[in-house]
Amino acid sequence: MKQKHDLINIFGLIINQNYFCLNGALFRQMEGLAMEAPSSAVLSEIFLQHIEHNYVMEILITNYVLRYVRSVDHTLIV
């Protein structure tokens, strides 16, 4: 349980410290993940797997979906 709490704290720090520079001015990203940041890919994958395992699988079973495939940000449903 401590590991889970530690990971949540680390991810919170990563998400809340997204800064970028545009035309010499420094900005803080208020929502979402930073584009092309290495941490964004990992956090996005964790989130999508959570959604798939907790919500999508039930929908697929109840609607007789034959095939569900996801690759990064593309989804194929047959």
Image (cartoon, rainbow, N blue to C red):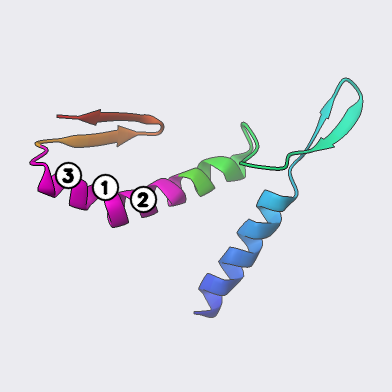
Residue at the disc numbered 1: 56
Tell me which label, 3 or 2, sits earlier in the chain: 2
- Residue 67 lies left or right of residue 71; in this view the side is left
Does residue 71 appear left or right of residue 30 in this picture? left
Q: Which mark is residue 51?
A: 2
Figure disc tally: 3
Q: Residues within 10 Å of mark 2 (few under 14, many from 20)?
A: few
Decide: marks 1, 3 in contact (CB < 8 A)?
Answer: yes
Extent of the magenta region: 45-65
Write down the residue under mark 3.
60
Give the distance between the C-alpha atoms of the residues marked 1 and 3, in whole angstroms: 6 Å
Question: Dot 3: what SS?
Answer: helix
Question: Which secondary structure class fits the magenta region best?
Answer: helix
Residue found at the very far top of the displayed protein: 23
Q: Quick check: 78 above or below 8?
A: above
Residue 5, percent from left and from top: 57, 73
Say which quarter of the image contains residue 77. top left
- Quarter that holds the C terminus: top left
Q: Give the side of residue 78 with respect to residue 10, left or right.
A: left
Under mark 1, the amino acid is Val
Q: Are marks 1 and 2 in contact (CB under 8 Å)?
A: yes
Of all residues shown, which one is farthest toward the right?
24
The part of the image, by quadrant, that contains residue 72 is: top left
- Amino acid carrying label 2: it is Ile
Q: Secondary structure at mark 1?
A: helix
Q: Residue furthest bottom?
A: 1
